[in-house]
Image (cartoon, rainbow, N blue to C red):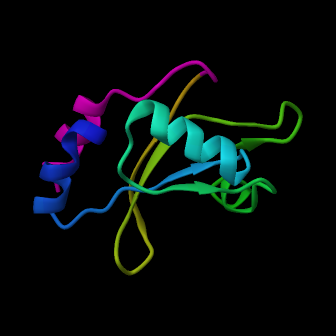
Amino acid sequence: MQSNLGELAKRDIGLVAISVDDVAPGKALAAKLGLTFPVLADPKATALKAFGIFDAETEIAWPSIFVVSRDGKVVHRWLADTFSERIVTADVMKALDTP
């Protein structure tokens, strides 16, 4: 998604990541990956639970992407089938082109 920030900005779309990790590990990961968008810390998994993507048994959040409109409605979402799966950026960009 990082490489598509310019295209997202043209569409007036912002990007934010939410991690169950504390602030310091999140900052370290963002720096290591060269991320320029915010990586928010949610160590109590409050937001992750609200989105229904936190597995309390394993304390891992499922990889997912949500597109939320300005009025707070989820207009697109992708949920991984496994913890190790990642959503393909091209699929996200393609879906953003369809109403």
Residue 17's place in the image compared with 94, above or below, is: below
Q: Position of residue 31 (x, y in %)?
A: 47, 39
Left or right: 60 with respect to 90? right
Instruction: From the top left corner, tell me how far across and down residue 26 is, in percent.
Output: 61, 45
Q: Which of 18 and 22 is in front in this view?
A: 22
Looking at the image, residue 69 lies above or below residue 6: below
> For residue 2: magenta?
no
Image coordinates for residue 96, horizontal then vertical, percent: 20, 49
Q: Would residue 79 appear left or right of 89 to someone viewing this image?
A: right
What is the residue that sits farthest to the bottom in this orientation?
A: 71
Whether residue 7 can be seen here = yes
Please state, as top left, top right, bottom left or bottom right, where the N terminus lies in the image.
Answer: top left
Name the residue located 25 percent from the left edge and 62 percent from the top edge.
Answer: 13
Tell me the residue at 35%/77% (across/down): 70
Q: Could one spot residue 53 in this view of the protein?
A: no
Picture residue at 45% right of the left edge, 75% below the top? 72
User: How far from the left and from the top, in percent, is residue 45?
Assistant: 76, 54
- Residue 95 on the magenta segment: yes
**Vertical placement of 88 versus 16: above or below?**
above
Quarter of the image that includes the C terminus: bottom left
* Number of on-image labels: 0
Residue range (magenta): 82-99
For the point 67% across and 41% down, the residue is 25
